[in-house]
Image (cartoon, coloured by chain):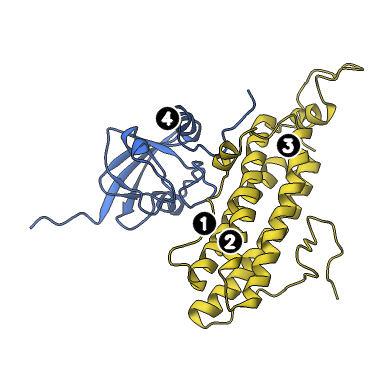
Amino acid sequence: MNQEPEVFQIVLLLSDDERSIQVKREEHIWDAAFAAGISLPAMCHQGYCLTCAGRLENGGEVDQADSLVYFPADREAGFILPCTGKPRSDLRIRTQQQNQMREFRKRSGLPAPYSWSKD
Amino acid sequence: MPEKQKVPVVKAGDVTQRVGVEVIRARGVDVEKLIKMLIANAAAEFASTYYYYTILRMHLAGHEDYKEICEDARLEDRAHWELIVPRIYELGGELPNDLPAFHDQAGCRAAKLPDPPTTVNILTLLLESERCAIRSWIEICDLTFGKDPRTYDMAARILNEEIEHEAWFIELLAYERDGKSIPSGHFRRGEPGHAPYSKNAGFYNP
């Protein structure tokens, strides 16, 4: 019988470093990073504001059921919200992708908080 | 003292630039980012909370005390909205001339009536809305501390009230859901919408 793994290996591709952490199945990726001494961007901690956004490299599965707003298009484009995302596979995550995710949302006609300007 | 960067001098009579903006930019404030954050927070105060709290309050039937406290939070969020808007324009920003676009800029979710609209569900939603507000206002405090005293002062006043709102809703939810007493420690309000910090009213300080 195949059992789902309880812990996943997550590689965080930071702006100036690469760190590997272990994240439990029922743990938010952001929380595990914080516990490992890695302070990722975040604001609402509710899966809404996009401040914590990351992007998957090489695919993988993330459970975003705890996020208030997360679209299938976000998943297809590889964007994730680590503050409310739980791993379902080993992952490589490019961090600090809030601007990219907001631009993606705007291009897709989806809500992109913190992005409006008169220009 | 924050380190000052070189910025263009605003020439006498020039109305295309603002000294009030350039001096904070010179001290390291990312003004464009700040404007986006203020618009998102204004949308959260007005569209995500003030508007939806009106509906939430209506559904707290049988709990006149909860209704009154929800009403205080609602009217104080409206006071915050009124306080933020002039600062957006002073900084050279402007509100989206489209209400749905403005709504979608909110940094916190719309506090829509939960299903089912039980008292516990409504109080939980109110609590989490206030928590989002605290997190967004402290970001503005961090962004402006020691560099932009005008925005910082405004953000700190709003943050004071959001922190009090959180404490109230913790108290109410703990009592209603868990039968526990977790006092907020205060309820220094006069008439509804008193907003002692954001309207600069006198503080209750016996």
Q: Are marks 4 and 2 on the same chain?
A: no
Q: Nearer the viewer, residue B31 or B101?
A: B101
Q: Are marks 3 and 1 on the same chain?
A: yes
Rendering colour (chain A)? blue
Q: Earlier in the sequence, mark 2 or mark 1?
A: 2
Q: Which residue is mark 3?
A: B88
The subunit letter for the residue under badge 2 reads B
- Mark 2 surroundings within 10 Å by alpha-carbon count, few (fewer than 14), some (14 through 19), many (20 or more): some
B15 to the left or right of B50: right
Q: Which residue is mark 2?
A: B55
Q: Earlier in the sequence, mark 3 or mark 2?
A: 2
Q: Is residue B147 visible?
A: no
Of labels 4 and 3, the one closer to you: 4
User: Given the image, on which type of amino acid does mark 1 rest?
Assistant: Lys
Rendering colour (chain B)? yellow
Q: Nearer the viewer, residue B161 or B111?
A: B111
Q: Secondary structure at mark 1?
A: loop
Of labels 3 and 2, the one closer to you: 2
User: Given the image, on which type of amino acid does mark 2 rest?
Assistant: Ile
Label disc, if present, on residue A108 of the rendered structure: 4
Q: Which residue is mark 1?
A: B112
